[in-house]
Image: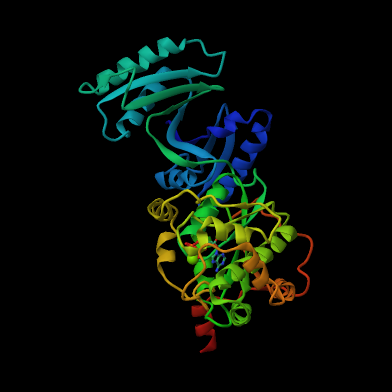
């Protein structure tokens, strides 16, 4: 009987020349992690695909669905594997086309990666094509623009047959592009920004600034939920939480109201830069989108950016809110971001924030309080939580300067323990 397996297609990796095997190996590692809850028998590379076999040799749609969400995957096909026997692969082609959903036209595309196989691909096309015409008499063959292509691929003594395939998220395997520190709030934008750089192969280490102790720790739990929601993509290794509420309070008393947000952000960027140095991350990432809110004018972006030396990536800078929302829905963070929690963004907000900050005023305000001491104190009191979803994350060897503690149990758990 033909075995059913998942055939993973990857485009961009193919373009990477001699780095190709590093990329493929990383993809295989990441797929192992993403498929932990399935009975996977084997994941191996063959001739431009990664083949995922389940223990019962009958891979499911659920498995294909989990694979689709892994960065680096361009498409996934539920394929049949048979030997070289024509009868077997023709039967599989009929089954595969029968599972392809609605279609009017099809074509057969035969390929050979084994030179030892006797038949020419033209001959295979005709053989399989005429069997399919007989099995599907009301469908027509269209070699130029078919609704479905039935691929029959002979590789190393086996034949792989598939018709429909589902698109994957694309991008590159996480772990092939270094590490970034992403500034993660529980809003819509930064989870999407995190996912986007992760999809380009970066290991993400989010840092969340909470308003604690001036606000509850609700936003921290929402951020943890966001990281959990991103688990299928495997982009996050560790999340840092920095309670900044008291410092915001001090800043709000020291500087002109309109410049508060810029001061908070500068401090956040500097803490994030420190974490990047500790983690060996090469860039910061934010969810900023040009002009979306007062703090995201070019002048204000410059006024904040100026206080760090590390590159700051803004993958959403040219995106509209609707595009961001659609992406948030697709990656599963939308519902979490809909829950509002007071975080440091809602704390001590000015009535009229500056939209076009002038640099001399920014620097004057910055020097009017002891930002250097604040930075040290915030870094000293930072907390973190590790996530097992990212096999390429390696925790830093250098320890945080004084103590660091894991985040505590979830609020429900704490409540039940207290009873
Ligand atoms: P988001 O939807 O990501 O919250 P936003 O539209 O609310 O963004 P801002 O509040 O101006 O916009 O924040 C801009 C960016 O600054 C965020 O995308 C995020 O990267 C970072 N940021 C804002 N607040 C926090 C926070 N509390 N912790 C960590 N990063 C933050
Ligand atoms: Mg926000």
Whether residue 20 is visible here, answered yes or no, is yes
Residue 28 or residue 247, whichever sits in front? 247
Quarter-wise, where is residue 298 in the image? Answer: bottom right
In the picture shown, does residue 30 fall above or below 348? above
Colour style of the rendered protein structure: rainbow
Q: Residue at point 45% right, 43% down?
A: 64
Q: Residue at x 58, y 34 (%)?
A: 13
Q: Is residue 162 left or right of residue 391?
A: left
Say if 365 sits above or below 148 in the image: below
Quadrant for the N terminus in the image: top left
Tell which of 398 and 233 is nearer to you. Answer: 398
Between 230 and 283, the one nearer to me in the picture: 283
Taking the image as shown, residue 179 lies to the left or right of residue 126, namely: right
Residue pictured at 63% horizontal, 51% vertical: 203
The reply to whether residue 385 is visible in this rendering is no
Tell me if residue 185 comes above or below residue 374 in the rendering: above
Q: Position of residue 126 (x, y in %)?
A: 36, 12
Q: x%, y% of residue 368?
A: 69, 76
**Measuring 48% from the left and 47% from the top, which residue is drawn there?**
69
Give whichever of 384, 52 is nearer the camera: 384
The spot of residue 268 in percent (x, y) is 63, 67
């Amino acid at each position: 009987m033909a075995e059913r397996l998942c055939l993973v297609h990857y485009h961009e990796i193919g373009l990477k020349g001699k780095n190709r095997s590093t990329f493929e190996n990383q993809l295989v590692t990441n797929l192992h992690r993403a498929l932990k809850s399935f009975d996977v028998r084997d994941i191996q590379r063959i001739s431009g695909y990664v083949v995922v076999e389940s223990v019962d040799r009958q891979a499911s749609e659920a498995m294909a669905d989990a694979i689709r969400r892994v960065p680096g995957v361009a498409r996934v096909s539920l394929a049949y594997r048979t030997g070289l026997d024509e009868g077997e692969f023709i039967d599989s082609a009929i089954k595969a086309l029968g599972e392809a959903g609605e279609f009017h036209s099809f074509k057969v595309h035969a390929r050979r990666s084994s030179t030892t196989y006797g038949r020419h691909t033209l001959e295979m096309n005709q053989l399989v094509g005429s069997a399919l015409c007989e099995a599907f008499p009301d469908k027509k063959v269209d070699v130029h623009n078919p609704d479905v292509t039935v691929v029959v691929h002979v590789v190393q003594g086996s034949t792989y047959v598939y018709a429909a395939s589902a698109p994957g998220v694309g991008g590159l395997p996480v772990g092939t592009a270094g590490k970034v520190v992403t500034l993660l709030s529980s809003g819509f934008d930064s989870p999407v920004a995190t996912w986007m750089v992760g999809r380009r192969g970066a290991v993400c280490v989010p840092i969340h600034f909470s308003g604690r102790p001036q606000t509850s720790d609700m936003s921290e739990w929402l951020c943890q939920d966001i990281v959990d929601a991103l688990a299928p993509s495997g982009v996050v290794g560790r999340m840092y939480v920095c309670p900044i509420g008291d410092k915001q309070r001090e800043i709000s008393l020291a500087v002109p109201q309109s410049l508060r947000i810029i001061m908070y952000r500068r401090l956040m960027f500097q803490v994030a830069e420190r974490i990047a140095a500790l983690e060996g991350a090469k860039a910061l990432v934010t969810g900023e989108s040009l002009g979306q809110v007062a703090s995201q004018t070019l002048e204000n972006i410059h006024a904040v950016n100026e206080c760090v030396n590390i590159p700051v990536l803004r993958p959403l800078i040219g995106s509209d809110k609707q595009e961001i929302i659609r992406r948030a829905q697709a990656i599963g963070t939308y519902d979490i971001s809909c829950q509002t929690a007071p975080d440091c963004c809602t704390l001590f907000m000015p009535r009229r924030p500056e939209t076009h900050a002038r640099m001399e005023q920014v620097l004057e305000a910055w020097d009017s309080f002891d930002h250097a001491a604040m930075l040290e104190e915030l870094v000293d009191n930072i907390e973190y939580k590790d996530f097992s979803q990212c096999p390429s994350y390696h925790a830093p060897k250098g320890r945080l300067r004084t103590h660091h503690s894991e985040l505590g149990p979830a609020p429900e758990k704490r409540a039940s323990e207290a009873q």
